[in-house]
Image (tube, rainbow, N blue to C red):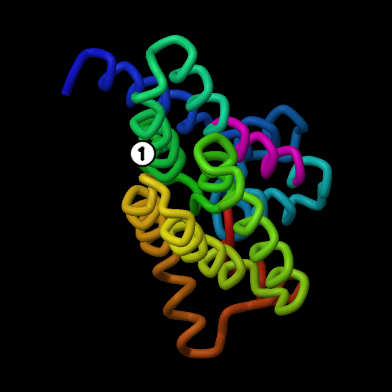
Amino acid sequence: MTRETLLALALGYLLGSIPFGLVLTRMAGRGDLRGIGSGNIGATNVLRTGSKMLAALTLLLDCLKATAAILIAERLIGEFNAPFAASGALIGHLYPVWLRFRGGKGVATLLGVLIALLPVAAAVYAAVWIFLLFALRISSLAGIVAAISAPIVAYGLHSAYSSLFAAFGLLVLWAHRENIGRLRKGIEPRVGSKGSSSAEFKG
């Protein structure tokens, strides 16, 4: 690895590891997010604090921190280092050193990666995510299917990022492994249901 590559990875990781859900809820006086609901730092768990505004802001910032990392890396380090900044951002969100490597699920952050690297895939990803979320009200399933759509769209467009997006999709699926287990058993709570406080769906 070159110095530029390592710098892009570090930049991505530092921005990606910012736990906006935790920061925002503390600033708003909502307490430690890790002690609420599932304990996850993602937007769905922020919603359990009772603030839709904080949840929406968390979702937006978790998305845009990845976009920002990539664009900054392209501008200051070189466009060929964009994939490394993207990798650092997603890994930073999933495994932030500040939180003992217990981060979010990566759905919003992966969207931010796609916005910067392949906007068409980002549009499909967002459409799949939103449609399934409203149709099924199972946030984890919506995020999982959206993550799977990214490499498929990239492959269909003959994008050089197909393999990278496949790897990112696998990371998101791994972060949802407990959700997948509940989906297989048919016990995954739906958004807004009484049982939804026991599981985290996206982030």
> As shown in the figure, which amino acid type bears the numbered disc 1?
Arg
Which one is nearer the viewer's eye here, 187 or 167?
A: 167
Mark 1 Cα-neighbour bin, 10 Å: few <14, some 14–19, many ≥20: few
Looking at the image, residue 179 lies above or below residue 76: below
1 lies above or below 156: above
* Magenta stretch bounds: 56-65
According to the image, label 1 marks what residue? 100
Q: Position of residue 38 (x, y in %)?
A: 56, 60
Magenta run includes residue 195: no
| Residue displayed at 74% across by 46% down | 55
Horizontal arrangement in the rendering, residue 95 relative to residue 56 (left or right): left
Extreme left residue here?
A: 1
What is the secondary structure assignment of the residue under circle 1? loop
Q: Residue at x 65, y 63 (%)?
A: 129
Asked if residue 61 is among those painted magenta in the image, a careful observer would answer: yes
Q: Quadrant of residue 101?
A: top left
Image spot of residue 122 (x, y percent): 60, 49
**What secondary structure characterizes most of the magenta part?**
helix
Q: Quadrant of residue 19?
A: top right
